[in-house]
Each structure stands twice: as structure tokens, then as C-alpha cells.
Amino acid sequence: MQSGSVLSPWAMATDAVSYSRRLAKKLGCPDDYGKNSVIVDCLRQKAAKELVSVNFKVPNHLTSLGPTVDGIVIPSDPSTLMAEYNSLYGNYDLMFGVTKVEYYRFTKNDERNGIDTQRRDKILRTLVRNLFTFHLQEIYLTVSNEYTDWTQSTVEASSIFQSVTDLLSDSTVVAPSVKAGQLHSRLQRNTYFYTFLYATEQGNYPANIGCVQGEDLAYVFGAPLVSGMQLGFFTSSYNKAEVMLSETVMNFWANFAKHG
């Protein structure tokens, strides 16, 4: 598992029925609650381009249409299923990991100038409001305290930018991934956790930020091994150390798949 687990807030759709009816309505299909099969039949007649052209305003960090606890494919809450001693989750060894920066929805201006306290507070309040139901103010104050560097007499905008990046990465990817790993390790299977920290020299992000989610994929799929060529959407220029790193990562992944 790379950069996420089913326990991430965005991994499961909690209001998919509502969004699917809105989708049907926008595409001219019946949205009568008593005619589910009619809605499905109508949506199946639509072209893929039509289906993905509909944009929903989805709260930050959540998902509109995605995996749902339906009682059949996903019979119960994933955290409950993953904790059961005889669960499918415990049938396999697990390697899971994260990058240095798992959440990055920022602009070039943010990178250069940082983030002020007012915007940080807005981002944090939105996160808490969308992920929790009770004790919102207490959670907000606790998280704000945890991600404030109290050793500094003055807080720089660049420092706030870094702390917000850490906060969003931890809450939406890292912590849920670690929890998934802990649940797995209790099932007496081999559980391995890695962090991928290397930032590509000529990557898409400033090197001082660290490895951003998705940058690790180039090394897993071997993009540096064909340096000078464009492999998919990856950058096309890598140095010798990055070629060696990719070979190492590919060996790690293949050896785990083959030998555990």
C-alpha cells in the first residue's frame, strides 16, 4: 500500500447515494427514489465522457462517488473488518509506506511566500469540520497546538506553510496508514513500514519540500532507467544516483512480492 489506506477520510464514499442521484438528474435520468434499477439502466447508456463531465462540489478531504459499505462487497466498516482475527486482511504480508509530503494542493506563490496565520486557521477549521462531528473546537485547539513551533519567538510564513503541509499529510494519509499497519500487525502477519523521502533533483516541486506524493512512483516503475526518454507523465531527466535508487526500489518491491 502506497500513500494511503482504506482508513483515509477520502478513501470511502459516505454519501454516494445522494451524489449518484444528483448525477442522474444532471444527465437527464430519472431520480425517483423508488426506481433504482431505472436510474442504473439510464446511467449505463451514457458515454464515459458524459459521466465524468459532471462536477460536484465535494467537501475538502472527502469523496463523492467511491467504495461504499454496501453490506455485500464491503460488508461492514473497514476498520472493523481489518481487526477481525480471521479476516482476509490477515491472510497476506503487508508492505506499506508514505512519502515525506502526502498532501500538496498549494500554489507557486505559497511555495515562495508561505502561508499566513489567518489562512492556516481557515484550512485547519475546514479540516476539523469535515472530518469530525463532535468537540470541534477542542480538536481544533489541540491540533493547532501540536503543529505550532513554540520554540520560535516569531512564526515565519514559510514555517507555517511547512506545518500546514505536515498537518494535512498526517491527518489524511500518514496516520490512517499507520493505523492500518497496526491493525495488520496484530493479526500475526509480517508488516513492513517504509518512508520514501528522496526528492527528485529535477522534479516538479522545490527540493527543500521533500518527496511529494506520486514522486516515488517514478522509482517503482523504473523511469530513471530510461533517463532521457519520457516514461508516462514522469520527468525525463535523472542523475546516476537516481538511477541506482530506482534499481534498489524495484528490487525491494519485487523481492517483497516474491519472497515476503
Image (cartoon, rainbow, N blue to C red):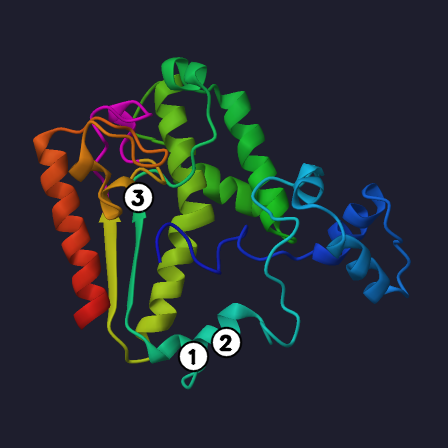
> In the rendered view of the protein, which quadrant contains the C terminus?
bottom left
Asked if 219 appears above or below 45 in the picture, the reply is above
Q: Is residue 95 magenta?
A: no
Q: Is residue 60 visible?
A: yes
Residue tagged 2: 81
**Which contiguous range is marked in magenta?**
196-211
Rendered residue at 16%/39% (across/down): 225
Rendered residue at 54%/50% (across/down): 10
Q: Is residue 260 visible?
A: no
Tell me whether the residue at label 1 lies in contact with that at label 2, contact meaning CB atoms closer than 8 angstroms. yes
Residue tagged 1: 88
Inter-mark Cα distance, 2 to 3: 29 Å
* Residue type pointed to by label 2: Leu
Inter-mark Cα distance, 1 to 3: 27 Å
Inter-mark Cα distance, 1 to 2: 8 Å
Residue tagged 3: 217
